């Protein structure tokens, strides 16, 4: 059984934030995450457990009848489901799965994913992030376009330009991170180790420096 799923979103003057969490939105705990370019998407796939599929970039057709395009919508598939897949050229297929899918290779994460969110339609000159987390580790990708990620451990800073989904950057617990210099077509995806919790954010830089003095440094 498959059904359409609409992702929650939030829009402000910094652009659009679209997100999905296990249990809160998806009816399962996420075991594996798969990120597949259009050339590698299989024509048919067997899903051994509950699964969520979407194309944050491009379009997806399932069984010739269900059509999905871009951020905001996807499909929930129930247990033991076989699907026929077709994606447009240049698409990126994201799969969040309750169980390993034998025919696919999952992303190698240093943590178990519990939340995935996307930032898009970011106006010129705007930045995202500018905070640290007390308990959450994150892996940051560009799925389209490019942007810079600045990582700050309270002692040193480094900046990384993301231009390919194959080269994400990690923002570990306790690292202040700022995303900026987005191209107008940029789509950022973040895989997070924890569910959203406003108390997990350190948004004041002075507070971040004080906390960093009393905790081990993440280089």
Image (cartoon, rainbow, N blue to C red):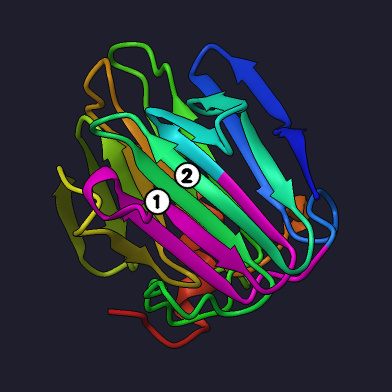
Q: Nearer the viewer, residue 111 or 28?
A: 28
**Mark found first going from the N terminus, 2 or 1:** 1
Residue 133 in sight here: no
x 42%, y 16%: residue = 121
Which is more toward the observer, 137 or 32? Answer: 32
Instruction: Tell me if mark 2 has few (under 14), some (14-19) or many (20+) residues whose alpha carbon lies within 10 angstroms of its own.
Output: some
Q: Secondary structure at mark 1?
A: loop
Above or below, comparing residue 127 to residue 11 in the picture: below
x and y, in percent, of residue 3 in the image: 78, 39
The residue that label 2 is drawn on is 85
Under tag 2, what secondary structure? strand
Along the line of sight, which residue is nearer the eye, 173 or 107? Answer: 107
Task: Say whether residue 122 is left or right of residue 76.
Answer: left
Decide if residue 68 is on the left or right side of residue 213: right
Asked if residue 30 lies in the magenta stretch, the reply is yes
Which residue is at a point 50% across and 72% down the rendered structure image? Answer: 173
Answer left or right for 48 relative to 62. Answer: right
Residue that badge 1 annotates: 43
Residue numbers of the magenta segment: 28-53
Q: Is residue 178 above or below residue 128?
A: below
Q: CA distance from mark 2 to mark 1?
A: 5 Å
Residue 158 image offset from top left, x and y in percent:
17, 59
């Amino acid at each position: 059984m498959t059904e359409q799923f609409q992702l929650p979103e939030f829009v402000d003057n910094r652009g659009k934030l679209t997100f999905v969490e296990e249990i809160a939105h998806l009816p399962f705990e996420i075991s594996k995450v798969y990120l597949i370019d259009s050339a590698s998407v299989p024509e048919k796939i067997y899903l051994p457990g509950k699964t969520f599929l979407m194309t944050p970039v491009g379009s997806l057709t399932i069984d010739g009848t269900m059509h999905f395009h871009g951020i905001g919508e996807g499909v929930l598939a129930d247990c033991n489901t076989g699907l026929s897949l077709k994606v447009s050229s240049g698409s990126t297929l994201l799969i969040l799965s309750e169980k390993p899918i034998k025919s696919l290779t999952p992303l190698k994460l240093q943590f178990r994913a519990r939340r995935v969110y996307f930032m898009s339609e970011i106006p010129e000159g705007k930045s995202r992030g500018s905070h640290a987390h007390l308990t959450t580790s994150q892996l940051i990708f560009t799925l389209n376009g490019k942007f810079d990620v600045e990582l700050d451990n309270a002692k040193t800073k480094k900046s990384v330009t993301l231009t390919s989904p194959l080269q994400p950057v990690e923002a570990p617990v306790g690292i202040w991170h700022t995303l900026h210099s987005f191209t107008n077509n940029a789509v950022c995806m973040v895989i997070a180790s924890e569910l959203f919790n406003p108390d997990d954010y350190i948004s004041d830089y002075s507070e971040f420096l004080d906390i960093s003095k009393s905790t081990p440094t993440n280089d």
